[in-house]
Amino acid sequence: LVGSEMCIRDRVKPDKATLHFTVVTEAAQAEEAAQANAKESETFLAAVKKVLGQEEQVKTLRYQVLPIFKRIEKVKGKEKTQTSEIAGYRASHRFEVELRDLKKIGQVADTALKNGANQVQGPYFSHTQEEDLQAQAAVKALERGRKLAEALAQASGLKVKRVTKISTTHTIHPRVMSMAKAAPPPGAAQDVSTPIEVGDITFRARLTVSWALAP
């Protein structure tokens, strides 16, 4: 028997990008915060959907309304105590936007931030054919492992007969870019469009193979 371990890295251009946007509003009462958030979210959705293509989509990831607490320090004699009380409420609506046209990432981000979104995360790059690309990387690793085994077998006066054991691990290393940009106040001059550089994503396959050798 002879064993070999091979690692193959394949780089490809992504064909899909995901962005996360959050609409955040605050008010004295929970209902007020929720109503304000609903209004801003409708504005956000209407603006973003105008930019999206047929294969692109936007969906809700999370919606919540939570109290905002503030600390209150009380002094009684020589003793100090701290308590918390509700100072208001915060409503947040998180959306996921999936893009296929990666040239529109900056446009979508700018549109969202100018129409209700307060926070942005991403883009997260990926590929629609990830399983096939991982399989291709694994096959390349196996081919390289066989060449090494054949070289070792030939040096020993033997030949590779068959694979007796094989194990593999797959990993994906997507390129993630973080963006943080505030929407301009009403009446302010328009900012330059956000430039986005699309890099490669890496598919890695690692194989550990045992080969049977014979004369």
Image: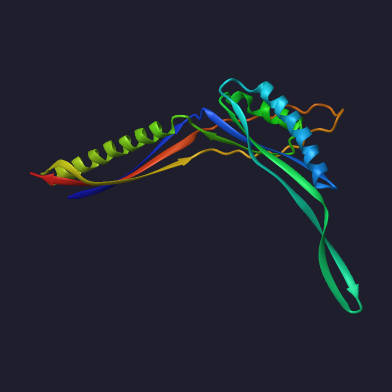
- Residue drawn where x is 63% and y is 24% of the image: 104
Residue 163 in percent (x, y) is at 20, 43
State the residue at coordinates (67%, 27%).
108
Q: Front-most of 4 and 96?
A: 96
Q: Is residue 156 left or right of residue 202?
A: left
Left or right: 60 as drawn, with respect to 165: right
Considering every residue shown, the one lying at the far bottom of the view is 78
At 69% from the left and 26% from the top, the residue drawn is 48
Q: Residue at x 86, y 74 (%)?
A: 80
* Image label count: 0
- Residue at the extreme right: 77
In which quarter of the view is residue 199 placed?
Answer: top right
Q: Residue 214: horizontal and vertical position, in percent?
A: 10, 45
Q: Which quarter of the figure has residue 168?
A: top left
Is the C terminus in the top left, top right, bottom left or bottom right quadrant? top left
Residue 75 sits above or below residue 63 on the image: below
Kindly give the residue lying farthest to the left in the view shown: 215
In percent of width and height, residue 47 lies at 72, 25
